[in-house]
Image: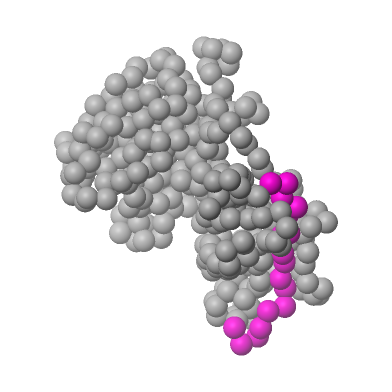
Amino acid sequence: MSDQEIPVTDGFDFPVGKPDAKGYYVAAGLAEQEYYERFKAWHPGEDWNDLRGGDSDLGAPVYAVAHGLVVTSDSFPAWGNIVLIEHLMPDGSRVWSQYAHLQERLVEEGQVVHRGDQIGTIGKGAGDRYPAHLHFEIRLKSMPANQWGLTRDQVLRAYAEPTNFIKSHRPGAERLEITVDDVDEVFVRSESKYWHEAAYGYKGHTYWTWTVSEEQGEDCWAEWRPKLPKAGLYEIFVFVPRRYATTRSARYQITHRRGVDVVTVDQSRYYDEWVSLGAYAFSTVQPGYVRLGDVTGEPYTRDKAQRKQIAFDAVMWVLSRSEERAD
């Protein structure tokens, strides 16, 4: 099938609790250490469960997250029923969404689906071997439907974290994005001799430094100060590069119209990926910004093999609701 016959995506919704995952939560995430310690495998997606627990979501509907082409609809050992959908992005790139352990498959290979179409129901895997849940993936590379057993680095290269990917690609008539890169005038950083630069990250550039302990005190810090054209509720995303981001405790401070919040991000989990910090109200007159420093609470060591790195890359504001609905 040609690209012209595959509808270009107009945004992504969640695969359960249509369209915003209402009533569901992520029980296991992408490449989580806890999952590896329990199952000795790096998890390549998210496991979605009903908030009511148990098998309460058995047979619940599963939806296509975006327009696309069904490239696999089949049954596999252990995995059970799988549906794999290819998506054509507006910029011409492709991603794939996969839905596994299904009780029923309601689409066939070669079928074009649209965002929100039901493509199956939640199951328990082949032979009902698992508690009922949806194993869901967003893939950045074309791979066999039953791909498994990759290293952590391979998983981070080939898969996006589904929740963050969907949040940064939601549909909407009004799409306002303000991105502050680490080379823009509204990006401000401290004068320190411990800054480093690297050809990685958003637009091929990032600043980074070593993390320091609470006792040492902050030396390297940066602020992203956007000039927002419209007041409203904005979701904030930070870009985490594939290299020089090994800290598990990057503390992003968000100053917004209603106060200050701090969100801790495990940068080591991401590979050239936008990560959501949540949604906050901003005005066009009251200063609002994101701040990040090199104090993470992690122990400092002179051994560079054990020391943590923290990256300072781009920050993006995405308008969720304009001013008249922001409160």
Inspect the magenta stretch and tell me whether residue 227 lies in it: yes
**Can residue 26 be spotted in the picture?**
yes
In the rendered image, residue 153, in percent from the top left (x then y), is placed at 52, 51
Residue appearing at x 22%, y 41% in the figure? 57
Which residue corresponds to the image point at 41% horizontal and 15% vertical from the top-left? 111
Q: Looking at the rendering, which quadrant does residue 220 occupy? A: bottom right
- How are the colours assigned in the image? one colour
Q: Is residue 184 left or right of residue 6?
A: right
Q: What residue lies at 70% left-to-right and 61% top-to-bottom? A: 286
In the shown orientation, is residue 188 left or right of residue 143? Answer: right
Which percent across, then down, holds residue 193? 81, 75
* Residue 42 at least partly seen: no
Question: Of helix, strand and loop, which mostly describes the magenta segment?
Answer: loop
Give whichever of 240, 51 is nearer the camera.
Answer: 51
Q: Percent from the top left, x then y, of residue 17?
A: 34, 39
Q: Position of residue 201 (x, y in %)?
A: 68, 51
Q: Is residue 14 magenta?
A: no
Magenta segment: 214-230
Quarter occupied by residue 5:
top right
